[in-house]
Amino acid sequence: MRDVIGRGKERCGSVAAAQFTIRCMQPVPATDPETFAERVRIVLVGTQHPGNIGSAARALKTMGLRRLLLVAPERFPDMAADAMAAGAGDVLATAEVHETLAGALADCRLVLGCSARSRRVALDELPPRVAAARLLATASTAPVALVFGRERTGLTNDELQLCHASVHIPANPDYSSLNLAAAVQVMTYELRLALLAGGAAQPAADGDAGARPSPNAVAVASAADHAQLEGFFAQLGDTLDAIDFHKGRSPDSAMRKLRRIFLRCDLDPRELRLLRGILADAQRMARLAGGATGAGGGVL
Ligand code: SAH
């Protein structure tokens, strides 16, 4: 078992999603099963029923996956988890337990959050098949994560904000909430289909078709990881405060939109350093201006 903090034993009808699907399909090199198993992480947040953790472990193993990450589970380890895991006790035994979602995602380059309903958050929503193809493409070069929420309340908006996009399984609109482990099974099956298809349908950075290496594969290879991006967003938030961008309004809406813009860009660490340099200068100028007007800012 991996010790982290402790141990335990589409909205698919959307036009934008459809356009994304058509525009982004193109052949790229396949991901091998071992890379797939090691780099694709399934993250369960705040799971309430340990039986669901066991069933999820079984779902992973049947689809050739093994990296199960648990964020603040209510009860784990637990006999109900062991019982439901059946022959997938090894997946439970190596499950990581994390205190925070951000901690669980730190080294991931692509994070997709599964939601039983559409939220009013500024986040792209992908159909499962497109999501699986995108995860597989990125997994050929870096760790990726698929995040699932609590049985009763799903993922919070703040948790979804840590994701690059959301995924919705197009269930009965009048009864769209699958059992947690069932949702894990559907999504891990889509991932397996994408693996077996040899990465035949992958997302690309543009509409360019053809058999040469995907420009997106190159971009993703050097993309910033989750922790680097969150550091940038924290500094962006501080800078907007320092230049009084919000003018008394709540910063949440602007930050959600800005996150969406930057998460679309597949920024690499050098680009992040450039942006952070600009922010640092803006913060410095704000401090100078504060000092000049005596408005409470410090001096350099
Ligand atoms: N009552 C919760 C549903 C929680 S189901 C709510 O309304 O949000 C537990 C988790 O399973 C969800 O957080 C989500 O990650 C996943 N899930 C369930 N149904 C899903 C669906 N139709 N599409 C995508 N994920 C789903």
Image: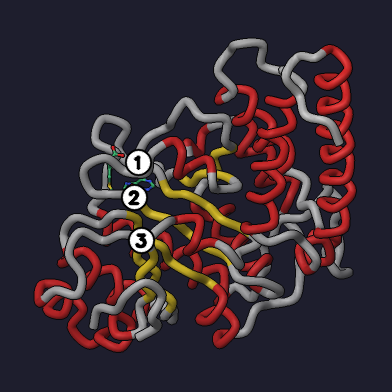
* Residue at mark 1: 116
Mark 1: which secondary structure? Answer: loop
Say which amino acid is labelled 3: Val
Q: Residue at x 35, y 66 (%)?
A: 70
Q: Quadrant of the N terminus?
A: bottom left
Would you name the residue on which mark 3 appears?
Answer: 71
Q: In 3D space, how far apart are the residues under numbered discs 1 and 3 (Cα atoms)?
A: 19 Å
Q: Nearer the viewer, residue 269 or 276?
A: 276
Give residue 39's mark: none
Is the C-beta of the residue carrying label 2 under 8 Å from the nearest atom of ligand 1? yes
- The quarter of the picture where the C terminus appears is top right
Q: Are marks 2 and 1 in contact (CB under 8 Å)?
A: yes
- Give the image quarter of residue 225: bottom right
Mark earlier in primary sequence (2, 1): 1
- Where residue 193 sits: x, y (%)? 51, 69
**Residue at 24% across / 36% down in the picture?**
175
Residue 153 found in image quarter = top left
- Secondary structure beneath dot 2 equals loop
Judge from the rendering whether residue 138 lies leftward or rightward of residue 286; answer left or right: left
Q: Tell me the crowding category of disc 2: few under 14, some 14 to 19, or many 20 or more residues within 10 angstroms, Cα based.
A: many
Circle 2 is placed at which residue position? 149
Horizontal side of 63 relative to 75 (left or right) equals right
Disc 3 is placed on an element classified as: strand
Amino acid at circle 1: Ala
